[in-house]
Image: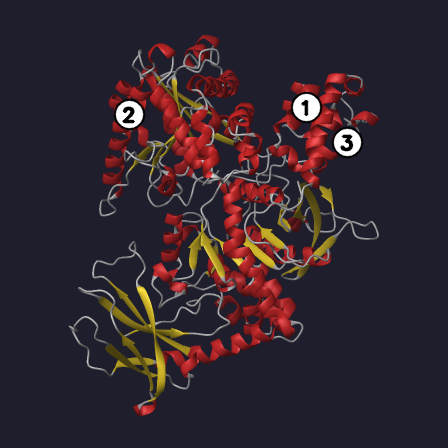
Amino acid sequence: MAGTLFQLEVNPKLPARLARLDDIANNLWYSWDRPTRTLFARLGNKLWGVVGHSPKAFLKRIDQHRLDEAAEDPVFLGALAHILSAYDTYHDSPRREHGPQLPEGALIAYFCAEFGFHESLPIYSGGLGILAGDHCKTASDMNLPFVGVGLLYRQGYFLQSIDGEGRQHALHNDADFEDLPVTPVLRADGSELKIGVRLPGRDVHVKVWSARVGHITLYLLDTDLEENSPHDRDITHQLYGGDRTTRLEQEIILGMGGVRALQEMGLKPTVWHINEGHAAFLILERMRDLIKTGMAFPAALEAVASNTVFTTHTPVPAGHDHFADEMLRRYFEECCHDLGCDVTTLVGIGHINDDPDFNMTALAIRGSRFQNGVSRIHGDVSADICGSLWPQIEAAENPMGYVTNGVHVPTFLSDHWHDTFDRVLGPAWRQRLTDQQTWDEIHAIPDHTFWSIRQSIKAQMLHLVSNRVTLQHMRNQSSQSHIDRLLRFADPENPNVLTIGFARRFATYKRATLLFRDLERLHRLICNPERPVLFIFAGKAHPADQPGQALIRRIHEIASMPKFEGHILLVEGYDLRLARRLVSGVDVWLNNPIYPLEASGTSGMKAAINGVINLSVLDGWWGEGFHQDDGTNGGANGWAIKPASSIHDQERRDQEEGRSLYEILQDKVIPQYYARGAMGYSPDWVHMAKRSIATITPRFNSQRMVGEYLSKYYAPADREWRRKSADHFAAARTLAEWKEKVRHAWPRVSLRRIDNPLKRIPWGDTLRLEVAVQLDGLSPADVVVEMLMARPSWNAKSKPPRSLLLEYQGPGQHGESIYALDLTPDVCGKIDYRLRAYPYHELLTHPFEMGMMLWL
């Protein structure tokens, strides 16, 4: 049709009785309050789906007459009043007691490149973002002094479709910020807050937006402004998009721009949390501010590091963000003037050993004093990967700790459970998420009631899966009869087929196709007409990850084989809504990564709190969560695939672990599910599902996680900041000068033993240990000389060795200092002991943070 096409959007007006719908639509509290989302859907279920479940977009497009009808509908008004009461009660609640109290004036700033709250705010790609969203929601639940900082992308992660050949297609849509639950931050004069960030040869203008997340605020940075060049407007255009230059510029905007944005708003964090290395440039920006006041570079680094927390989520060295040294020099050459250092010194903070690249993890570790992985196994892996940053410290003792991830129960627990939990656990169960005794009461739910709830949740999941599969195959020109055949085991009206889910990012280390190593055996297992099994696969592969996309094609290929038709479904368009349905609705949650490459994983936690049973490799969180039936602990809470020995090559490991998977399915999972009897369900299955909820919910929820961050990192970091910043940062200056002195002397420090080592002594006798230390100008108080004592069978998993300190006795020969210990052993038998020395100062946050240690 000829002529120019003009568009006009007519927005309805909220009737006075519905005015507060606008409050709710602009607070991401709705992302974990299902009754609120249900309320919007009641106004127009079809439109609710069209707008991607965005309350703000929904209220801009709904017909006026529908709002007018709702304003006169007593049932709707009653539901709205109930929701507003819950909303106001939540936002008026005081801080909940979980861990130590932070002092007045404390503020935690949490930086992350992505945040996953809800599908209506698409600024996330996967696990990192969902974890960050859960962290923020829980900080709101606990009413912590907390702000989040991220980037506002026009294009979040891509929308996925899968064609008739199994090829993934990525579609990127530009978001209309007017439809998102975000608003521009305004200055006191009413103008929009914009900051400047210096990049080579120009200033980039950055607009600051805010999103309300319950009690807390998330601030998001946006460069898509008319005053910027086309290149600079694109910096925040796409999540993880563009080339290495764009990636570096995104991280500069996030880290350095985030600090400036908080300053402009008058916010003064006492704790800075870098969630993955993308935001580590905040360290340099904070240092620059201190150096401008006259502080030296080393002292500024000590001050900034004192209250910085760094969490790594990456289990392999190649996964840590790094940039070419030449690129860093070009981008930070101007910055060096403000930092009072040359560019070689600056980029040196990001170097590891002889690697010429600038490593963001190295910057984050050197600029922080609190570091952690995200599970016990991952903490050990990270300590080893990052061990060269503490070169003389064994991995088991370096500062890398861990806080195992958890999930936000209100977001991922199906609402089908709420009434039963209120009746059986008591209405206060929501405030007792970490109380084991409360969750042990799960076993008081009658088996038939429990099974009925599980079937209802499963039917809800199958309804969504059936709709998605139908649309997917209709678009790919499949006939209705073929679609019916594909969905014959995914019947929401008869959800009695054992259903196993696998949904996550398609990366090769997650081994989505491990199940398909022996197709004949798999066919015998899952295609038995008396005991059929349905597998549901979903997930995305990064558009640049060809091996990951090959996994999708392989699953599609096998699902299309006539003998497997209907038993294997590949569902496109994996998003938060589908994830919530799958993790709550399947019977078994499958996870079989290559050990130890699963940093944590949280999807299995989300499944477990809903009574889904995990079948997983003992990696990540499952290494802590799995309970084996030992006859005394109430029974197993799932099934575990023991990792094959690392001495084997990957093919052999895949073979052995694949065989274990088949054996568990054949001997345990399938027989136990179908051992139903007259009651229509398997009592053993129900018991294990109850065990899954009871043992995993109190340990792997985000309330425990954030409480652990609060006690292990946030409260100590706040204390360190107050200590190091007092009296114009006197302590930071003192510590920096002392460290410089130690670094200069340490290469010439040496130990020698001057007593005569005895091999045997009678019970009750005393052994005198004497060590001469060449300090090369250090004070005797600058060094600790320590004896570690343990039984000969000691290893890293044993009880830690006993530590005894040698005391300074005075000067010895050749300028040495003498340290001694009189030891009277309190045990008989063989004892192993070692002697070592390391630098010590009362201002150190961690005794081994300098990475220096000498063993005699």
Reading the chain from its start, which is encountered first: label 2 or label 1? 1
Task: Count up the numbered dots.
Answer: 3
Name the secondary structure under disc 2.
helix
Quarter holding the C terminus is bottom left
Asked whether residue 541 is in view, the answer is no
In this rendered view, identify the residue nearer to me: 195 or 290: 290
User: Relative to residue 578, is residue 501 drawn left or right?
Assistant: left
User: x and y percent of residue 676 in the render?
Assistant: 34, 14
Examine the rendered structure and indicate whether residue 146 appears above or below residue 355: above
- Residue 657 coordinates in the image, percent (x, y): 27, 36
Density class for disc 1 (Cα within 10 Å; few <14, some 14-19, many ≥20) is some
Tell me the CA gap for discs 1 and 3: 13 Å
Is disc 1 in contact with disc 3, using a CB cutoff of under 8 Å? no
What mark, if any, has residue 668 been given in the picture? 2
Q: Pick out the residue farthest to the front.
A: 764
Tell me the distance, in whole angstroms, between the alpha carbons under discs 3 and 2: 52 Å
Secondary element at tag 3: loop
Q: Quadrant of the N terminus?
A: top right
For the residue marked with disc 2, what is the amino acid? Lys
What residue would you read off at disc 3? 20
Q: Earlier in the sequence, mark 3 or mark 2?
A: 3
Name above or below for residue 769 compared with residue 573: below
**Callout 3–callout 2 Cβ contact below 8 Å:** no
Mark 1 and mark 3 lie on one chain; the one further toward the N terminus is 3
Q: Position of residue 724 (x, y in %)?
A: 58, 69
Q: Secondary structure at mark 1?
A: helix
Q: Is residue 420 above or below residue 216?
A: above
- The residue under the point 52% across, 38% down is 433
Pointer 1 residue: 39
Residue type for callout 1: Leu
Q: Looking at the rendered structure, which numbered label has been put on residue 769?
A: none
Disc 3 crowd rating (10 Å Cα; few below 14, some 14-19, many 20+) is some
